[in-house]
Amino acid sequence: MIESASILVLIFSFLLLLAKGVPVAWCIAISSLLSMLISIPLLPALTTIAHRMATGLDSFTLLAIPFFILSGQLMDKGGIAHRLIAFAKALVGALPGGLALINVISAMLMGAIAGSAMASASAMGSILGPEMKREGYSKEFGAAVNVTSATTGLIIPPSNILIVYSLASGGVSVAALFLAGYIPGILTGLLLMIVAMIWAKKKKYKTGETSSGKEIWRTFINGFPSLMLLVVVIGGIVAGIFTATEASAIAVLYTLVLGFIYREISIKNLPEIILSASSTTAIVMLLIAASMGMSWIMSYENIPQDITSFLLEISDNPFVILLIINIILLLVGTFMDMTPAVLIFTPIFLPVVTALGMDPVHFGIVMILNLCIGLCTPPVGSVLFVGVGVAGTSIQKIIKPLMPLLVAMILALFLITYFPGLSLWLPELFDV
């Protein structure tokens, strides 16, 4: 009886606080504490939740997150976006919906390098938004493309959220997760490009001029040092030269040197960049700490085991169970931020899918793509709000062009869910 009451208090207090507009981290921490008060006194409950939050952050792997956030900030301020956009423009600018395709490709490259969907959405929207408007594109369509394409960088490595999943799953290889993200991320980007081309052709948007081979080569050379970061970071991890945490520190050094070489960053810019990265890190770490506390309580109450038993009683058909999990995660993504969602729901659903024979690496990619879709949907879609704000439009106006792009992302999700090879081929090829 106490267990049932504790679970009900956990769920309803969390939803009530969220509905009242309380920050997500505090929703998680307060609802966890209230749940504990059902069975133990106040002082032990406070001590336990504080202890679990502190020990949840005691991980060498988590050190990679502040370093990757800092390298992303350095990339954002270091002139990288302009060079990547120029390269993308030379490649696809002459195709139908050329500027939209440039946005998708640039976002894939920028997101992969910076590891931040919001940084990508902000940079691409600020640079490409005005240009798309001048060429006759509607700002709502431009914002919709920007919002959805920005999330591809969370699947294409290096990605902070894949590191968080590795922690939540009990130690799934970060190198395997990084390699597993490439094909799904590129597939999602290609589907978004197809939809953007169809929409642009229907609306008869302008196309650019075809670039010469010389122009493509010139823009590639200009962007090459930035693209090399992916080779250095991912190559070093896969080759076993350094760990993901060490790779994140190398990424900071590389991007700092590159910013100085491009003369886009100076010594006087560094305090502002470091302060911004520190602020973002603090938010992420508070979310992780609070989520680790809630995860412990759910484990203590046997919630993951109960849900595993319940789902397997509904059906033993992997297709059906994965469909149910996907629907649940799509709904979760609409009201919960990605980091706490990964930390809370990984321990719940991972035992279910492993019981069905699903690889934890494959499930990690499926979960992250699910939650990427949530970043593009209200009411908590953080990337959606950034994209709309940069474009100077409203959520109501963006819905129509956004819907076909979300359908493309959902199609990618189901392809990746039911064709494991899309995620597992590269990790198996490199034997990680």
Image: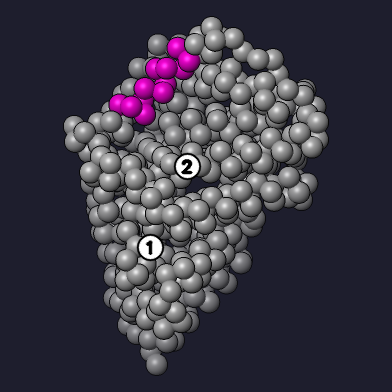
Name the spot of residue 39 as percent of width and height, x first: 34, 85
Name which residue lies at 46% across and 52% down.
416
- In front of the other: 280 or 427: 427
Q: Quadrant of residue 36?
A: bottom left
Dot 2 corresponds to which residue?
185
Dot 1 corresponds to which residue?
346
User: Magenta includes 7?
Assistant: no
Q: Is residue 55 above or below residue 311?
A: above
Tell me whether circle 1 and circle 2 mark residues in contact (CB < 8 Å). Answer: no
Quadrant position of the N terminus in the picture: bottom left
- Is residue 346 visible in the rendered structure shown here? yes
Q: Secondary structure at mark 2?
A: helix
Counting residues from the start of the chain, the first of labels 1 and 2 encountered is 2
Give the amino acid type for the residue marked by disc 2 in the picture: Gly
Name which residue lies at 51% across and 34% down.
108
Q: Is residue 382 above or below residue 334?
A: above
Q: Secondary structure at mark 1?
A: helix
Quadrant position of the C terminus in the picture: top left
Determine whether, in the image, residue 51 is placed left or right of residue 114: left
- Is residue 65 visible in the rendered structure shown here? no
Which circle marks residue 228 in the picture?
none
Give the amino acid type for the residue marked by disc 1 in the picture: Thr
Name the spot of residue 271 as percent of width and height, x first: 42, 26
User: Magenta includes 223?
Assistant: yes
Assess disc 1: are there few (<14), some (14-19) or many (≥20) residues with their C-alpha within 10 Å of its C-alpha: many
Task: Please report the bounds of the magenta region as a residue range.
Answer: 220-232
